[in-house]
Image: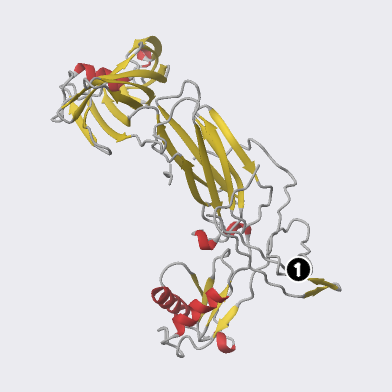
Amino acid sequence: MRSCHNSRLFAFIRMRPVMARGQLMIAVLVNFIAAGWRQPAAPLPRARSSPGLTAMMIVPAAVSVAALLLVPAGRAYAQTPSPVVIPGVFDPDLADVKAGKDAEIRQAVEKFGHDCYPPTVTTYGSGGEFAGPLAGARADSIRAALGGGLNVVANTNKSAAIGSLGNGVQVSYGPFSPGDDKDPPVLEVHSDPPKGTKVTAGQQIKVTIKASERYADGHKSWPSGIQVIQLTADDGLVNSQDYGKPPDPCSVRTVTWPYTVPANPPPVLHLLAETENGAGLQATKSADFPTADWYGTLKGRAQGNMYNDAAMVTFSFDVANDNVITGKGHAKVTSAPQDFAGCTITLKVTPDEFDVDIGGRLDGGEFKLAIKYLKPGQVHRTQVCPKNPRSSGSADFPINPFLGVGVISVATGPNIGVTGGGFYHPRVRAEDGATNTLSTKDVAGEELTASIEIHAAKRAAKD
């Protein structure tokens, strides 16, 4: 598996002799910086594991490295810079930041040259009973003076004012604690061709995934490192990379994996990039690739009588020269328990995922779509009636596969709502990013709401 870094490599080397049992330890810190998809999370399966992965350290040829850091077993983490104290940030017993001191704090943070770990600015009181409140007020002043991007904490210990610390601040990077990672990894995903591009069977999509826990890349809490990256498609796992445990907290992980569009692709092909850090926190981004000139999503929600159902159809279609629309869609239907007539009713439709045909016409700058399912569904109905146990029971029977969304749409006719067209006959402007909604209620109080969004597919550069 190759690791692809798309921008220059920077190395920061800090050597500090440390005497421990007669051994000289030289710490070499190396940071990698490598050069969008939509945020959409279930735990990542460990599809493939690579135990014993060895990290490779790369430094410019002009630098002579005397030794590598001797790391105790179980600790593969780089050392962090020593704290820096900035005295005289505040006047005695006051909370306002003195002129010019905000710039000194920024310089103290920047001069380390270490972009992995989140800096922490600690404020103190002047000792005595009011040390805690004063330290808190000073922390607020630091936040106001420096803005976001720094972790500012107040040391409320009454005896914390020692020498220059009393009216100063300390900039530090620790101490390290695995539980301090509170944020998911920072995830960037790019593809060739870009998301939203029309694809065909056999075409290859190259996906580049970059995951980082570095402060400079936007990760704000203490880094635990990138544990795993993986890419999945509608037809399953594309690829996965595990970086061992514990992962290096400062390494930027970049992979580029190809995916080949299958022989019979879905109307809209979905790719999902996922990453997980050493603390188990995840980040995901997804992208859609249509197989026709237009694509979109139709969502419906129905409640009333025995129905409490939702349906979603992802679809794509082409428009012929005579304005006739032809396409395909894939539907997913879910149902929740519904209270009706003193009973709780639960419906389970089979299948709950199925294909549909997309028809209709382009008329006056508006798409008038027609959704057609191919065969009825079979529903298992369970009814629990606490006040009338004899009415409880279950039954199986054929039904509209869209459950309440389809039943109520048919019952209220093909033209519902001021926008026209029911769930089976949605209308939307023939424009990229166009949307439309409808809402209706029949005389029995059954409600149906729906929304549609469409996009024009991008064309690959070779077209």
Quadrant, the C terminus: top left
Whether residue 306 is visible: no
Identify the colour scheme used. secondary structure
Furthest toward the top, the residue is 397
Task: Return the x and y of residue 251 as percentages of the image width and height.
Answer: 62, 56
Residue occupying image coordinates x 57% and y 46%: 276
Pick the residue in front: 54 or 21.
54
Furthest toward the front, the residue is 462
Task: Return the x and y of residue 25 as percentages of the image width and height.
Answer: 78, 70
Q: Amino acid at mark 1?
A: Val
Residue occupying image coordinates x 16% and y 26%: 420
Disc 1 is placed on an element classified as loop
Task: Return the x and y of residue 9 as percentages of the image width and height.
Answer: 60, 60
Q: State left or right for residue 86 relative to residue 331.
A: right
Task: Return the x and y of residue 118 as percentages of the image width and height.
Answer: 54, 66
Location of residue 406 with respect to 125 vertically, above or below = above
Residue 93, image quadrant: bottom left
In this rendering, the count of numbered labels is 1
Residue 20, image quadrant: bottom right
Q: State left or right for residue 413 relative to residue 290.
A: left
Furthest toward the right, the residue is 22
Q: Which residue is mark 1?
A: 65
Quadrant, the N terminus: top right
Pick the residue in front: 386 or 357.
357
Whether residue 407 is visible: yes
Location of residue 212 with respect to 408 vertically, above or below = below
Decide: few, some or many residues near mark 1? Use Cα within 10 Å; few <14, some 14-19, many ≥20.
few
